[in-house]
Image: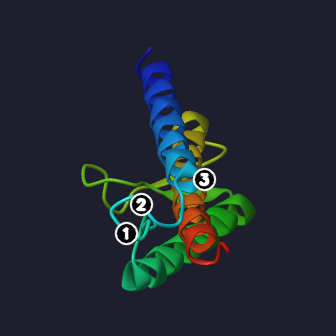
Amino acid sequence: MRAALYYLLMLLLGFAFYKFGQNLLRKPRWSENGERTEGVVGPVGLLVTTGVACYLLFALLRALVRGEVPCVGKACTNQIYTLAANAGDYWANMFFLAWMVLGLSYAVYVTLKIWFRE
């Protein structure tokens, strides 16, 4: 039951983030007050977000190839979940990594789309 609640909350968070990005993309380039529509992150935030997304993508691909993923969180430091021994925890951490990569990539996409629209 706890795992189902975890996945449901992650999906709801992803949906809310998607709707927020779509609302930003629907806004005109300039508001009626003469202010520019800003993206999700600024220039420095874009670099940081891109770097974190690339690192998490590398960790995700590494975990897929090796069949083991380090635990994500404070309570389980230095613990490694393997696909053979801890399948549920392995896939929960893989889902979290994939979800973070998708969310950060979407933030970068929305920001670049806003910056380069005509």
Q: Marks 2 and 3: in contact by CB < 8 Å?
A: no
Q: Which residue is mark 1?
A: 34
In front of the other: 48 or 41: 41
Toward the left, the furthest residue is 75
- x, y percent for residue 50: 53, 77
- Precedes in sequence: disc 3 or disc 1: 1
**Number of marks present in the image shown:** 3
Q: Are marks 1 and 2 in contact (CB under 8 Å)?
A: yes
Residue depicted at 57% across the width and 62% down the height: 110
Q: Which residue is mark 3?
A: 98
In this figure, which colouring scheme has been used for the structure? Answer: rainbow
25 vs 44, left or right, is right
How far apart marks 3 and 2 lie (CA) works out to: 35 Å
Question: Which residue is found at the position 50% from the left and 81% from the top?
Answer: 51
Which of the two residues, 65 or 34, is positioned nearer the viewer here? Answer: 34
- Label 1 sits on what residue type? Gly
| Vertical relation: 98 (above or below) 38 | above
Amino acid type of disc 3?
A: Ala
Q: Is residue 22 above or below residue 3?
A: below
Which numbered disc flags the more N-terminal residue, 3 or 2?
Answer: 2
**Which kind of residue does numbered mark 2 sit on?**
Ser
Pick out the residue farthest to the top: 1
Query: Which class describes the residues within 10 Å of circle 3: few (<14), some (14-19), or many (20+)?
Result: some
Q: Could you tell me which residue is drawn at 40 percent across and 55 percent down? A: 72
Quadrant in which the N terminus is drawn: top left
> Residue at label 2?
31
